């Protein structure tokens, strides 16, 4: 990418060639200096003597060079840049014992433009902002996609259990059934093992507005009045005072049309050291879907994968899967391995293809390109850049009014501000 940038910039360089003919007693052959200037003395530089390259220097390096191997003792041949009579301007000069050697071509040296402070600040800040926007473009696309794309997200609780949980007090169901916004709802946690009767208590979490939790029976009932995923923790206690805590999710789905919906209700219980697989499915919206797991911490041995299948436009993401073998973390010799049994809340998000970030990015493309080209002229104090930017702004307004091309109003306003700064400095430009 950087090489491409240098190639584009090099198209705007102007060549400057200077030639000197030192006395034969001092140097054999012509001395030739080539400068490819993009702005003042900024640009690559090459020096030749008698057809042989003496040096090749970068954009910001100077031209100063002495020739101690040429001439008789006491004769110093030196190339340097000296200031001209015009303020801030420099020219190359070859000297022999501090006496100038005439330059044969009469080439006018690169012009070092004297930029007004406001113009220099506006040009530099605008270029910096455009460069940062270009670098951040992939992240901007993801942000727009997440903000405006039709999506659905759900919180799941993955329970990892030890082997041999039969007979032990535990919840039989890994999740509660989903509720629908505005529709009556009633459910009760299912308990196995232990000794009846059971009692329940809600330890933490906020219930959806409209639903109520009964501590005696564990019954959750009512009519939900808000949508979303609500993580709560329930404690069940049997007749022998054995208890177990259960983090679970009450998912209240809104009745939105034309939006994708995760149809997976719950995740099966995973058993340590046993193969595990759970699939996330969705319907509605416009496939293919984009799946994201927003919780990075998974039990050791499990991975989140996006499944693909051949569609009309190639490979399409249709579902996601959590698979692997939950295992204890490897430990050093002599240490006791820690169990990974427990509850792991996970949030899964699915987004369909109904929205494209290009819809919001494309209106900025034409202003971005036009401004970046014109700012090169601004930096070189060239009048054509102000004229070109003015014509570009008029063309963009015309295209937008005629509905031929979408152009961002904010981009045009910013261009007008840059144009105003250029217009103010127009009399000082060449």
Image (cartoon, helix red, strand yellow):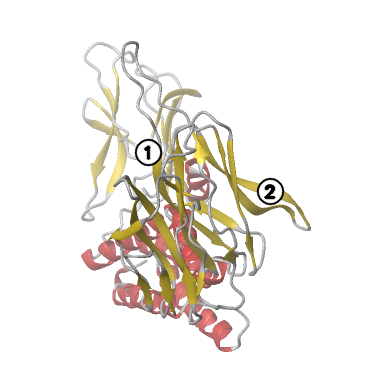
Q: Position of residue 73 (x, y in %)?
A: 24, 11
* Residue assigned mark 2: 308
To which quarter of the image does residue 332 belong? top left
- Label 1 crowding class (10 Å Cα cut-off): few <14, some 14-19, many 20+? some
Q: Which mark is residue 207?
A: none
Q: Position of residue 106 (x, y in %)?
A: 40, 46
Residue 119, quarter of picture: bottom left
Neighbourhood count class around disc 2 (C-alpha, 10 Å): few under 14, some 14–19, many 20 upward = some
Secondary structure state at the residue bearing disc 2: strand
Front-lying residue, 290 or 401: 290
Q: Position of residue 429 (x, y in %)?
A: 34, 68
Q: Quadrant of residue 386?
A: bottom left
* Secondary structure beneath label 1: loop
Among all residues in the image, which is located at the extreme bottom?
A: 401
- The structure residue drawn at horizontal position 36% and vertical position 22%, both measured from the top left corner, is 337
Counting from the top left corner in percent of width and height, residue 228 is at 43, 69
State how many labels appear.
Answer: 2
Residue 268 seen in this snapshot:
yes
Sequence-wise first label, 1 or 2: 1
Which of 396 and 50 lies nearest the eye of the viewer? 396
Which labelled disc corresponds to residue 103? 1
């Amino acid at each position: 990418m950087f090489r491409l940038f240098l190639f584009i910039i090099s198209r705007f360089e102007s060549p400057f060639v200077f030639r000197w003919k030192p006395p034969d007693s001092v140097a054999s052959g012509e001395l030739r200096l080539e400068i490819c200037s993009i702005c003042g003395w900024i640009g690559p530089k090459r020096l030749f003597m008698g057809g042989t390259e003496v040096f090749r220097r970068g954009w910001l390096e100077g031209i100063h060079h002495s020739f101690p191997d040429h001439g008789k003792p006491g004769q110093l041949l030196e190339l340097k840049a000296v200031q001209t009579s015009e303020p801030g301007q420099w020219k190359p000069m070859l000297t022999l014992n501090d006496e100038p050697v005439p330059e044969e071509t009469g080439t006018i040296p690169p012009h070092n433009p004297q930029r007004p402070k406001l113009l220099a600040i506006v040009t530099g800040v605008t270029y910096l902002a455009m460069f940062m926007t270009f670098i951040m473009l992939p992240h901007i696309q993801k942000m727009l996609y997440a903000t405006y794309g039709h999506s659905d997200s759900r919180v799941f609780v993955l329970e990892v259990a030890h082997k041999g949980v039969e007979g032990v007090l535990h919840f039989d169901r890994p999740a509660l059934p989903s509720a629908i916004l505005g529709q009556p709802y009633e459910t009760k946690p299912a308990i196995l093992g232990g000794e009846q009767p059971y009692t329940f208590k809600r330890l933490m979490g906020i219930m959806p507005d409209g639903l109520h939790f009964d501590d005696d029976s564990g019954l959750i009932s009512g009519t939900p009045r808000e949508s979303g995923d609500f993580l709560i923790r329930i404690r069940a206690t049997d007749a022998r005072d054995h208890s177990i805590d259960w983090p679970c999710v009450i998912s209240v789905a809104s009745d939105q049309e034309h939006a994708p919906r995760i149809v997976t209700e719950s995740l099966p219980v995973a058993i340590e050291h046993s193969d595990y697989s759970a699939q996330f499915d969705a319907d509605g919206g416009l496939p293919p879907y984009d799946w994201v797991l927003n919780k990075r911490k998974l039990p050791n041995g499990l991975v989140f994968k996006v499944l693909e299948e051949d569609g009309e436009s190639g490979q399409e993401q249709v579902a996601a899967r959590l698979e692997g073998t939950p295992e204890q973390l490897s430990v050093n010799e002599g240490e006791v391995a820690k169990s990974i049994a427990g509850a792991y809340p996970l949030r899964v998000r699915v987004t369909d293809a109904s929205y494209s970030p290009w819809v919001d990015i494309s209106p900025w493309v034409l202003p971005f390109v036009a401004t970046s080209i014109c700012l090169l002229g601004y930096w070189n104090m060239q009048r054509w850049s102000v004229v070109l930017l003015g014509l570009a702004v008029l063309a963009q307004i015309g295209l937008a009014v005629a509905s031929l091309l979408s152009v961002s109003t904010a981009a045009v306003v910013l261009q007008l501000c840059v144009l105003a700064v250029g217009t103010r400095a127009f009399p000082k430009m060449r």
